[in-house]
């Protein structure tokens, strides 16, 4: 959600994918121009190509760690495109020649970014008055942590925060 919110604010045309209709609705609220549900769309890569005039996305970001989603993130970008993986864990299987080499695709793994990058991001958010608090749909007390984790494990809601009291 935060990537959708920030990319949209930066002027990007955002295509958001999620298997939760609630999260797709939130993605539209955060500025997604197009939303695709991989649970109901039989060919995600083709759907992305269809809305990009057959070329594919310039950039893709996978935060799911799903092997299928990771492969689709690589396959949906255009020639010279870039795919970034930020979700922890999991594997991905690619046809290196077709998926990468022949299309000059760059794959980036990113776990975090530098303190300089974090400061730049914070300034960008502050300068534009971006409502990052809107990312949080739930607030929980510490004694509700079990319930909170059960809900967030369903991956159907926005972000949540657990407070000590």
Image (cartoon, grey):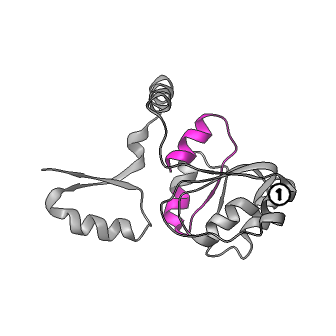
The residue lying at 66 percent from left, 35 percent from top is 11
* Percent x, y of residue 69: 62, 67
The residue lying at 75 percent from left, 63 percent from top is 75
| 21 falls in the magenta region | yes
* Percent x, y of residue 134: 41, 44
Q: Which residues are magenta?
A: 1-25
The residue lying at 47 percent from left, 25 percent from top is 123
Left or right: 165 as drawn, with respect to 106: left
What residue does disc 1 label?
101
- Could one spot residue 54 in this view of the protein? no
Q: Is residue 71 above or below residue 101?
A: below
- Could one spot residue 152 in this view of the protein? yes
| 23 falls in the magenta region | yes
The residue lying at 54 percent from left, 48 percent from top is 110
Which sits in the foreground, 68 or 158? 68
Which sits in the foreground, 84 or 129? 84
SS at mark 1?
helix
Q: Is residue 130 above or below residue 32?
A: above
How many numbered discs, if any?
A: 1
Graded by Cα atoms within 10 Å as few (under 14), some (14 to 19) or many (20 or more), the crowding at tag 1 reads few
* Percent x, y of residue 87: 51, 59
Left or right: 24 as drawn, with respect to 162: right
* Percent x, y of residue 154: 40, 71
């Amino acid at each position: 959600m935060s990537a959708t919110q920030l990319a949209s604010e930066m002027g990007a045309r955002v295509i958001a994918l999620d298997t939760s209709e609630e999260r797709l609705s939130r993605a539209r609220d955060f500025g997604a121009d197009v939303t695709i549900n991989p649970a109901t769309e039989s060919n995600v890569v083709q759907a992305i190509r269809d809305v990009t005039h057959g070329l594919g996305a310039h950039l893709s970001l996978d935060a799911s760690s799903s092997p299928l989603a990771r492969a689709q993130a690589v396959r949906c970008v255009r020639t010279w495109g870039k795919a970034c993986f930020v979700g922890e864990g999991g594997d991905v299987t690619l046809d290196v020649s077709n998926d990468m080499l022949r299309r000059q695709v760059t794959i980036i793994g990113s776990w975090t970014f530098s303190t300089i990058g974090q400061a730049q991001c914070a300034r960008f958010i502050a300068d534009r008055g971006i409502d990052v608090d809107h990312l949080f749909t739930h607030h929980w007390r510490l004694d509700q942590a079990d319930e909170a984790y059960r809900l967030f494990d369903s991956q159907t809601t926005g972000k949540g925060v657990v407070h000590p009291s």
